[in-house]
Image: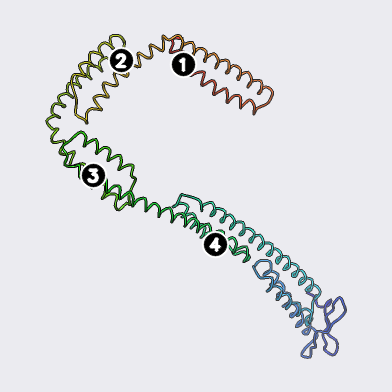
Amino acid sequence: MSSEPWGRVDESGTVYVRTPDGEKVVGSWQAGSPEEALAYFERKYERMVVEIGLLERRVKTTDLSAKDASSAIESLRAQVDEGNAVGDLAALVKRLDALVASVDSRREERKAARARQSEEAREAKEALVTEAEELAGSDQWRPAGERLRALVDTWKGLPRLDRKTDDELWHRFSHARSAFSKRRKSHFAALDAQREETRRRKEKLIGEAEALSGSTDWGPTASRYRELMREWKAAGRAHRDAEEELWARFRAAQDVFFQARSAVFEERDAEQRENLTRKEELAAEAEKLLPITDLKAAKAALRSIGERWEAVGHVPRDARAGIEGRMGAVERAVREVEEAEWRRTNPEARARAAGLTGQLQDAVDRLREQAGKARAAGNTAKAEKLEQELAGRQALLDQALKGLQEFGG
């Protein structure tokens, strides 16, 4: 920059700087030429320019606190006010004034940001409290307990509020957690008591099962064992570490009885296996009746097979369901054909089906007409609603028509 507008050196070596308020003495120079004097004081000015520029960048680009920024501004202002430099001091004052405004603006922004953060933290903590209070009444002990622990971790990660608000919210939060813990503790205490009572009941059932294990009164004893099993299932579960041992003892007592009964029944089983062979032959004979083309002949043949079936006697227990299932399938097929024939020839049922079909057809026609009018009028929402209802009625009509066809109509 040129030194002519801002400073001069008089004959005595006194150095002046020009300001809007007139000239001001900034120092004296006796060691060299006036040019060297002005250059020296201009360098002092340039240093202030550099320092102000650095502070401007720090304010703009870093998180320099408002307090530190204000302190730096005041220090630089003092240097400028002392005026021991040659240059546009008024411009530096303006830059410092602009910095003050910028710092004040940032202070307000940070204050607003802190207020927003505080409000967000308050809302977040209130949400945590609300959720914790809802969880306090939950019976989902494990997931609710895990969620409450997660809420505590979330709470710890949130900033503190003012002491009164933070304490009030924490009190509610802590109370909800305590209420849940108290309920859970009470629940499991009751559950433990219930399981202990279950253990005692099962010990009693085991005692009776063990007392019956030597009985040879096969029928009544087997029946009582079935009753004991129902009572066992109804009793619930004891503690896990006791349940397996209790069940092993209960099952062992039954095994003693049923193994003894099986040995006595072994001879009887040979006869029942022979019966099974005969019933398999009868089941195969019955299965040849399928598919049924002559209902009357099939019914007569099935009656004959049934009479012979009843005369055969018992089959082994483990084969009973399978062999009876085969015969039962044929019997169901005959009944279904018989029922279908009855439905087909039943005039009252056909009349009801025809009447229902007619009603549904009228409803479908009416809805189709209404939907068409609505769409033509541009009422898309009404048209879509009517079309949805139309689709449902059409499905019912299709089903009714299919049923009507079964009557030959």
Characterize the local packing of mark 4: few (<14), some (14-19) or many (20 or more) Cα atoms within 10 angstroms. few
Q: Looking at the picture, how far across and down is residue 155, in whole percent? A: 54, 60
Residue 392 at least partly seen:
yes
Is 323 or 261 nearer to us in this picture?
261
Under circle 3, the secondary element is helix
User: Which residue occupies 40% across, 52% down?
Assistant: 190
Q: Which residue occupies the extreme left position in the image?
A: 267
Q: Name the residue that disc number 1 marks.
A: 402
Q: Earlier in the sequence, mark 2 or mark 1?
A: 2
Q: For the residue marked with disc 4, what is the amino acid?
A: Gly
Q: Name the residue that disc number 2 marks.
A: 291
Q: Looking at the picture, how far across and down is residue 102, in whole percent? A: 73, 67
Do the residues bearing badges 2 and 4 touch, measured as CB atoms within 8 Å? Answer: no
Q: For the residue marked with disc 2, what is the amino acid?
A: Pro
User: Which residue occupies 56% across, 61% down?
Assistant: 171
Q: Earlier in the sequence, mark 3 or mark 1?
A: 3
Under circle 2, the secondary element is loop
Do the residues bearing badges 2 and 1 touch, measured as CB atoms within 8 Å? Answer: no
Q: Name the residue that disc number 4 marks.
A: 157
